[in-house]
Image: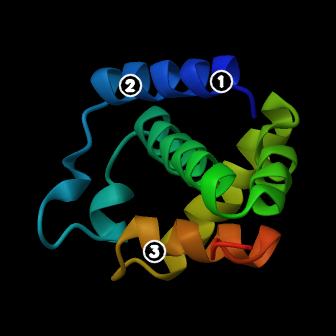
């Protein structure tokens, strides 16, 4: 990812966060709370989490970042399909924080976020 792409990603993330404030920082936030949001809010939360994970992995494990980009962002249809998969897993694990479920799905799809040498 070049610096222009990184800035565009950061600006998009900031715009998304401004449009959909994250109540998820509150203590005790769970999948049950997440599932009470409308679909647009859920999709925004998932998208923000995936974008942030991809951005972080560009620094720690570029191969994971490449995989995440292809796995999630290849097309709008694929992104929506991935959102549906993640939403279903959050529903099945509603007592957990949605970010933990999302991270699990991303690591299963593309591997570890651990730094590579």
- In the rendered structure, find residue 3 and report the number of the disc placed on it: 1
Judged left or right of residue 9, residue 96 is: left
Q: Position of residue 61 (x, y in %)?
A: 72, 63
Q: Please state which of residues 49 and 35 is positioned toward the viewer in this rendering.
A: 49
Image height of 25 relative to 77, above or below: below
Local secondary structure at mark 2: helix
List the residue tagged with mark 2. Answer: 14
| Badge 1 element | helix
Of pointers 3 and 2, the one earlier in the residue sequence: 2
Q: 57 or 83: which is nearer to us?
A: 57
Q: Which one is nearer the viewer's eye here, 94 or 78?
A: 78
**Disc 2: CA contacts within 10 A as few (<14), some (14-19) or many (>=20):** few
Q: Which residue is mark 3?
A: 100
Q: Residue at x 73, y 73 (%)?
A: 116
Comparing labels 1 and 3, the label whose residue is closer to the camera: 1
Q: What secondary structure is found at the residue carrying circle 3?
A: helix
The answer for how far apart the CA atoms under marks 3 and 2 are is: 21 Å
Nearer the camera: disc 2 or disc 1: 1
User: Which image quadrant is residue 16 in?
Assistant: top left
Mark 1 or mark 3: name the one nearer the start of the chain: 1
Q: Position of residue 103 (x, y in %)?
A: 56, 70
The image quadrant that residue 47 belongs to is top right
Residue 112, percent from left and from top: 70, 77
Q: Which-is-in-front pick, marks 3 and 2? A: 2
Q: Which residue is drawn at the image coordinates 78% and 38% (left, top)?
A: 73
Viewer-nearest residue: 54 or 74: 54
Going from the N terminus, do you reach mark 2 or mark 1 first?
A: 1
Q: Residues within 10 Å of mark 1 (few under 14, many from 20)?
A: few
Disc 1 to disc 3, how far (Cα)?
29 Å
Query: Could you say which disc has been placed on residue 31 in the image?
Result: none
């Amino acid at each position: 990812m070049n610096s222009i792409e990184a800035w565009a990603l950061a600006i998009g993330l900031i715009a998304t966060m401004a449009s959909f404030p994250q109540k998820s920082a509150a203590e005790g936030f769970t999948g049950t709370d997440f599932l009470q949001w409308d679909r647009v809010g859920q999709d925004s939360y998932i998208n923000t989490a995936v974008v942030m994970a991809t951005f972080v992995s560009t620094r720690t494990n570029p191969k994971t970042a490449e995989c995440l980009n292809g796995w999630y962002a290849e097309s709008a249809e694929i992104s929506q399909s991935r959102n549906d998969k993640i939403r279903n897993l959050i529903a099945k694990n509603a007592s957990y924080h949605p970010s933990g479920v999302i991270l699990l799905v991303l690591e299963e799809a593309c591997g570890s976020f651990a730094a590579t040498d």
